[in-house]
Image (tube, rainbow, N blue to C red):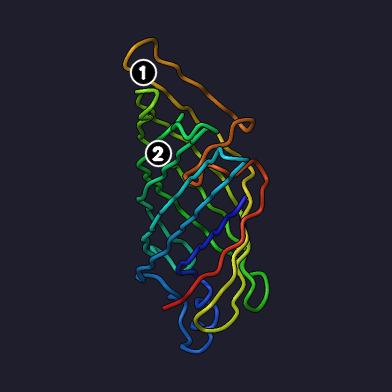
Amino acid sequence: MKKILLIAGFALFGFSANAQEEGTSKGLQGTFWVAGQVSFDSSKTGTSKTDSNMILPIVGYFIAPSTTIGIGVGSISSKDVNVLGVTTAQSSTFVVKPLVRKYWNITGGLFFYGQVAAPITFGKEKIADSKTSSFALEVAPGFDYIINKWMTVETSFAILNVGSSTSTPKVGDKTTNFGFNANPMNSVADRQLGNLQVGVKFLF
């Protein structure tokens, strides 16, 4: 499997340094930020192949020195081709992901944060001729570390996922699934409970 994962975003890390230099407790309150996540997956076994792509730009705003809100809007697509070269599955999904984060300074440039996100998806499966939708609530704490004035590194891991998904075929009955921890869901669509994610953030 080949996978490239890029996470670029704006973080709170300048808060501690700015507060010390400027002698203010305002931090980044009132500051807008942008972030994004892009992933490309390709898996091939013999002549069969599976491809999936995800693009999720995120924008946010610091409503307090250590609290920020944001929303991501993007898409996920996937395609499966069997050994005969026939497409057996092909889906496209629209993603909306609102989130909120709270930061706490541990020491120096190291911060701990708690994040709550509520990804919502609406999609279509072309081959099966069905529509899908899902809603989830995700709790994911993490750590942010300042590398320099324009770069930081972030790690995060999911500790709680709960949500439901629905598939409505053009012909047949609707199927609804509910998951609590055992069936984690988020906009990335590949995170399992506790899996660690690492990203690089660029400050501006």
Q: Are marks 1 and 2 in contact (CB under 8 Å)?
A: no
Which type of secondary structure does the marked residue at label 2 adopt?
strand
Q: What numbered label is drawn on residue 186? A: none
Given residues 178 and 172, the one toward you in this image is 172
Q: Which residue is mark 2?
A: 120
Callout 2: few (<14), some (14-19), or many (20+) C-alpha neighbours within 10 Å? many
Q: Amino acid at mark 1?
A: Pro
Q: Report the label total.
A: 2
Which type of secondary structure does the marked residue at label 1 adopt?
strand
Say whether disc 1 or disc 2 marks the residue closer to the N-terminus: 2
Given residues 53 and 157, the one toward you in this image is 53
Q: Quadrant of residue 181?
A: top right
At x 42% / y 63%, what residue is drawn?
35
Q: Quadrant of residue 4?
A: bottom right
Is 142 left, or right, of 202 in this rendering? Answer: right
Q: Which residue is mark 1?
A: 169
Is 101 left, or right, of 104 in this rendering? Answer: left
Which quadrant is home to the C terminus? bottom left
Q: Nearer the viewer, mark 1 or mark 2?
A: 1
Say if 33 sits above or below 109 in the image.
above
Indicate the position of residue 98 as horizontal and vertical percent values: 40, 48
Residue at the far front in the pictured view:
84
At x 49% / y 57%, what residue is drawn?
101
Q: Amino acid at mark 2?
A: Ile
Indicate the position of residue 77 as horizontal and vertical percent values: 41, 43
